[in-house]
Amino acid sequence: MAGNRIVIVGGGTAGWLTAAFLAKALGANRPGGASITLVESPDIGIIGVGEGTFPTIRATLATLGVSEARFLRESSATFKQGVLFRDWERRSSDGKASEYFHPFNVPVQPGGRDLSPYWLLDRRAGSTVPFAEAVTNQIQVVAHGLGPKRLEDPDFQGPMNYAYHFDAVRFADFLRGVAKDLGVVHLTGKVETVQRDGETGDIASVTAGELGVIEGDLFIDCSGFRALLIGETLGVPFKRCDDVLFNDRALAVQVPYATPDAPIAPYTLAAAHEAGWTWDIGLENRRGVGYVFSSRHSDEARAEEVLRAYVGKEADPLPVRLLKFQTGYRETQWVGNCVAVGLSAGFFEPLESTGIMLIEAAAMMIADTFPLKGRAAMEGAARNFSSAMSGRFERIVAFLKLHYCLSKREEPYWRDNADPASWPQGLRDMLAQWAHRPVSRFDFVVDLETFLPASYQFILYGMNAATDFSPVDGRYPDGVLARQTFEKVAAASTEALKHLPVHRKLVEAYYAR
């Protein structure tokens, strides 16, 4: 097999981000470059509910050659510096929330030293400084509602590590414009039939109404939950993970600000409730709020009560949108000449940031495999891609479960999550070790990880996981250096407050640029 005709079935964030990245990487607007066609149905809406990203999106956008101001303005985007978790460890029966912050800044490491054991030893001695605040200077920045950078900083760079929140529909529209500028051919029509090669079983073409037959060499399935190519046509099975991750429903609502100049939170707020949790993100003109929950632990009517109670009286007249989903993924995500990207490949709760990160990783891997000359090259690429992506999905399952399994809440939903019988074996193994030693980089296979070791530290120590370091106390002789570093971090936090702008003012300045 030889050819450079790529056909992407489906739009939305998955389709258009993949199309734009491949067009840029494979020279779709250059002579001899790849031919990339995206077929998008006018009748299928965009699923997007989480409306968030990881910091990796900055490098992706920079690769596409767009300006940060254009992206922010056209996507109604704001800045995101991490996630604030409220009431996950325990329920706030005393009126005081239990909360911790997962910043995007990575912990400082003087001379390459991991400071987590020294923080744990200080905590045992009575320190009350949260881990994230001790090892990064981002906590005070978000607590004061500041942005991660200044207007004069270069595009996609700033003193703080950051990602974005955005309007999912507008973000897809923005990506559509970028992709078309880069040479992607956009066809509007609903794919009705899929034709397979009689000899190889590969996809030969798709037929979309008046568009007729569309042939290709590589087909990318971005058709969402329907999984038209990888699922309906090729019959690749879907591996369910609902025995580990219980959530299978989400209710979402868009909440206008009370005033046009209301503060915009520079982080995602994730608040735990009786049978799930709410996300709360701030865009320029509204908040996106939703409740993700388990239908085994709550019905939809009760879930809507929880969501409306969280939002408050302003939610009473607002329409609520219901999303039903299965948590899981396809262990084989590239079969023959068909690759699944986005929701057709897998889905974990309405966590848009995780999903977009996986789209980015998939697009990069696809780009790096080209050119594909011959059947052997295609089959090798398929095996490599499927192995890498299924490994990522497997590890994401364990990482997400970590958020739940340390909880001390008493509701049935949380007790079931804290039951080790629902934990993946790999997570059980790690937690057994982390009870007596720090998180180590050797606990992870770097190329298969979506989350850095620091992310595990922020959750473990934010949730006050029990850790008995007495067997290894003698391994950490650099206590003086560690305390000096903690003091420097605190001083840097204070200094950052003097130089970073209020988040809303930064966003409005970018929109006006």
Image: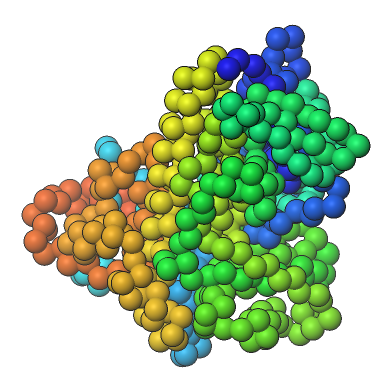
> Residue 501: in sight, yes or no?
no
> Residue 218: in sight, yes or no?
yes
Q: Is residue 67 left or right of residue 85?
A: right
Image position, residue 5 (x, y; %): 69, 22
Image position, residue 63 (x, y; %): 63, 27
Image position, residue 255 (x, y; %): 77, 70
> Farthest right residue?
210
Q: Is residue 258 left or right of residue 433?
A: right
The quarter holding residue 27 reads top right
Q: Please say if 367 is above or below 207.
A: above
The C terminus lies in which quarter of the figure? top right
Image position, residue 371 (x, y; %): 57, 16
> Farthest front residue?
198
- How many numbered marks does the figure carry? 0
Q: Is residue 196 left or right of residue 115?
A: right
The N terminus lies in which quarter of the figure? top right
Identify which residue, 238 or 440, lies in the foreground: 238
Please say which color scheme the image uses: rainbow
Q: Residue at x 80, y 60 (%)?
A: 285
Q: Residue at x 64, y 28 (%)?
A: 197
Q: Please say if 396 is above or below 121.
A: above
